[in-house]
Amino acid sequence: MPALLRLDGVHAGYGDLTAVRDVTLAVEAGEIVALVGSNGAGKTTTLRAISGLVPLRRGAVALEGRSIGGLGSAAIAAAGIAHVPEGRQLFPTMTVLENLELGARTPESRARRAETLGRVYELFPRLAERRDQAAGTLSGGEQQMAAIGRALMARPRLLMLDEPSLGLAPVVVASIFADLAAINRAGVTVLLVEQNVLRALRLSHRAYVLENGGITLAGASADLLADERVRRAYLGR
Amino acid sequence: MAVGLTLIFGVMRVVNFAHGDMMVWGMYLAWLLAARAGIDPYASFAVCATVLFALGWGVQRGLVQRIVDAPHEMQILLMLGVALILENLALLLFGPEPVRVRSALGALTWYLGPLYVDVARLVTFVVAVALTLALAAFLRRTDLGRTIRAAADNPYGARVVGIDVPRVYAVAFGIGAACVGAAGALTAPVLPFQPALGLSASVVSFNIVIIGGMGSLLGAFVGGLLVSVAESLGAVFLRPSLKELVSFSLLIVILLLRPAGLFGRRTP
């Protein structure tokens, strides 16, 4: 059986800059895979290339063995990849409910919109309380919940998150990471990009370390947590 | 008309300088339909709106989409070019003489005590209100309307959730052009027109949109009422040729007091 997501020799970038070089990775169904590395290592570009938000320069992206490279963001979202981007990117003047409903765009997710909405509200009761409030007036943590909720509304096969901890208080980060574990237990495969390497490695099953646009280390998260190089470079001990 | 301009600017941040000329095309279409097919402009405005929708869609897909992210001055050059082409095409096809469309309603007047009401103008007003309300409901209640608002609110976020943003832009531009096409057909019976009207119509609708607040539909509507009342009062109390003096003075006063317009949101 092919992996849920497979990248083969992917190059991507903006203008003259190639931010990601020759990235090969795989995500199996049911896993949480973390992509960690320092600022500017190419993590965000990798996710954007998967989503079709940045054009692929070279290489292949396949979802369950079917090539989705170069398809365009609308078609890739319809194929089952939901992206929670850095900075949340909600629709600030629209209500929480409208933001969530805009996440359900495929015929299948639209048909089951009410049911999925109920599950999102169960996971994030705060969003149910604030459903008629403009998304721009939410706190940072609530906005992150809304962005994750909006992605879940698509009933994705793969949920990709870009720096969900960015700009949030440690308590809020802990609760968001607990929610991610719960989402994964409910059967959603997760690809997580994080600068908070310790938290990402504790949550995930496997991880890739990205440096200067290329993958330098890969393996089970528990092994990477114990790895001398990872400890020195990212965990500060 | 100003509502259509607001929609285009609000969604794409592109200033449509061809707006007045699109309106003139709506007027000439109504005129053609009345002269050749005998259709009253109060019935043909739907046809004019449809044709202008197609024109707006085409202009967006073929031209504007290439420069959506370009600086404003480049967009202005492009839209001025479109305006010149539309105006001169109208000149070529219809000539420079002012024309007027006759409507069955044009001869009707109601007397309400000391007031007399021109039925044609009243119908124009009522239909314009109805179209504005319909557009607002469309943007609020329907899925397509919500994707238009989403793309206006955060184009990158819209791409992230898988909205085909260029397609949404084309629909929005089409609807904006359809509004102005309907506006043209509806004003054709009460206002004689010629190809050169386009530029001044564009200027008036910019005035309205800026007074109302860039990107606010309600602002465009209220601004339209304010400007037309101001111009009518100016025409009565000063001289008809000085009516623009009043509306542009109003613009300056409002910008001094509320730089973002009446209903505009401040942008950083």
Image (cartoon, coloured by chain):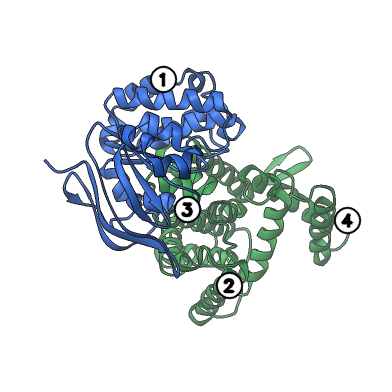
Q: Quadrant of residue B80?
A: bottom right
Q: Chain of mark 4?
A: B
The residue shown at (49%, 24%) is A174
Q: Which residue is mark 2?
A: B74
Instruction: Check if mark 4's residue and mark 3's residue have beta carbons within 8 Å.
Output: no
Say whether residue B184 is left or right of residue B170.
Answer: right
Residues beneath discs 4 and 3 located on the same chain? yes
Dot 1 falls on a residue whose secondary structure is helix
Say whether residue A86 is left or right of residue B108.
Answer: left
The residue shown at (40%, 17%) is A122
Question: For this rendering, which residue is in front, B5 or A85?
Answer: A85
Amino acid type, label 4: Phe
Q: Quadrant of residue B187?
A: bottom right
Residues beneath discs 2 and 3 located on the same chain? yes
Residues beneath discs 1 and 4 located on the same chain? no
Q: Which residue is mark 1?
A: A123
- Point out which mark residue B237 bears: 4
Q: Mark 4 or mark 2: which comes first in sequence?
A: 2
Label the green chain with its letter.
B
Amino acid type, label 2: Met
Q: Is residue A231 visible?
A: yes
Q: CA distance from mark 4 to mark 3?
A: 40 Å
In the figure, A224 relative to A70: above or below?
Answer: above
Say whether residue A105 is left or right of residue A86.
Answer: left
Q: Chain of mark 2?
A: B
Q: CA distance from mark 1 to mark 4?
A: 65 Å
Question: For this rendering, which residue is in front, B109 or A179?
Answer: A179
Estimate the x, y position of residue B37 in percent, counting from the top left. 40, 63
Label the blue chain with its letter.
A
